[in-house]
Amino acid sequence: MSEKPQRPGLVERCEKCRRETEHEVSIEIVTESKKETNAEFSKEPYRISRCTACGHSTRQRMNNA
């Protein structure tokens, strides 16, 4: 039985390592409003990127309008 080749991760520059490393990237929906009445209207997507070499994570709001 042969193994599937591993798919390489996304390569980005790490702020902490200061070099190009593989990163795990995901999207998280964050509720920004503290008020319960408007919470459903204040959800924003954030891009989460974690360096697989050192574990450093960055979080960036996706729609900075």
Image: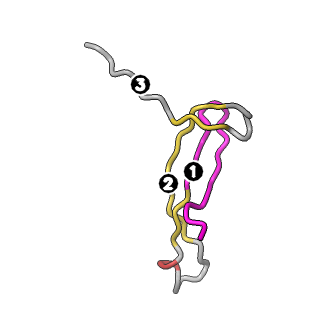
Between the residue at mark 3 and the residue at mark 1, the CA separation in whole angstroms equals 22 Å
Q: The residue under label 1 is which amino acid type?
A: Ile
Return the residue nearer the eye: 54 or 19.
Answer: 19
CA neighbours of label 3 inside 10 A, class few (<14), some (14 to 19), many (20+): few
Which residues, given as a range, are shown in magenta?
A: 47-65
Return the residue nearer the eye: 56 or 63.
Answer: 63
For image coordinates 59% across by 71% down, the residue present is 65
Residue that carries the numbered disc 3 in the rendered image: 6
Could you say whether the residue bearing mark 2 is in a helix, strand or loop?
A: strand
Residue that carries the numbered disc 1 in the rendered image: 48
Estimate the x, y position of residue 16 in percent, counting from the top left: 74, 38
For image coordinates 51% across by 71% down, the residue present is 43
Whether residue 55 appears in magenta in the rendering, the answer is yes
User: Does residue 53 lie above or below 32 as drawn?
Assistant: above
Between the residue at mark 2 and the residue at mark 3, the CA separation in whole angstroms equals 22 Å
Labelled disc at residue 27:
2
